Image (cartoon, grey):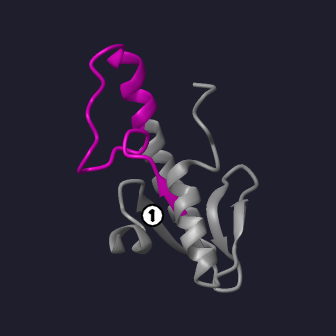
Amino acid sequence: MLANRRKDTSPELRIRRELHARGHRFRVDFAPVNPRRRVDIVFTRVRLAVFVDGCFWHRCPSHYVEPKSNAEYWRPKILRNTQRDAEVGEELKGAGWDVLRIWEHNPSRRQSLR
């Protein structure tokens, strides 16, 4: 578990590079409402919170595969992640923020041009 990064993951870096190349400026790993709920990419002026979610950790409907080993440990952990995602999204929306969730498998524009 220690090897799993909370921020600066490969998909997140890929998206941030593309946003920066297009001239967008943003905050990284920022807590706009609740100090215990951090957002991957935040556009403070337009109040947009962007989450880059991993397919395994956040139960991607297209790519999530139930773990075969130690499932009794992983199942509640993954379910709690998805519950927390919904709670954080509602908290941000209630505070007037727009929320965008991007799956790690979604290619950036630059990748799709290659």
From where the camera sits, is residue 33 visible? no
In the image as oriented, which residue stretches furthest toward the front? 114
Left/right placement of residue 87 relative to residue 102 reads: right
* Place of residue 63 in the rendered image (x, y in percent of width and height, measured from the top left): 26, 45
Rendered image quadrant of residue 3: top right
Magenta stretch holds residue 70? yes
Range of residues picked out in magenta: 51-79
* Place of residue 74 in the rendered image (x, y in percent of width and height, measured from the top left): 40, 24
Task: Please rate how many residues cluster around mark 1, counting C-alpha atoms within 10 Å: few if below 14, some from 14 to 19, many from 20.
Answer: few
Q: Which residue lies at the image location 63% right of the left edge and 26% below the top edge?
A: 2
Q: Judge whether 94 appears above or below 36 on screen.
A: below
Closer-to-camera residue (2/111): 111
Q: Which residue lies at the image location 44% right of the left edge and 47% below the top edge?
A: 54
Q: Judge whether 74 appears above or below 5 on screen.
A: above
As helix, strand or loop, the secondary structure at mark 1 comes to strand
Magenta stretch holds residue 102? no
Q: Judge whether 35 appears above or below 42 on screen.
A: above
Closer-to-camera residue (6/71): 6
The residue that label 1 is drawn on is: 101
Q: Which residue lies at the image location 35% right of the left edge and 69% below the top edge?
A: 114
Left/right placement of residue 109 relative to residue 9 reads: left
* Place of residue 97 in the rendered image (x, y in percent of width and height, measured from the top left): 59, 76
From where the camera sits, is residue 80 visible? yes
Q: Judge whether 109 appears above or below 64 on screen.
A: below
Q: Amino acid at mark 1?
A: Arg
* Place of residue 9 in the rendered image (x, y in percent of width and height, measured from the top left): 57, 48
Closer-to-camera residue (98/112): 112
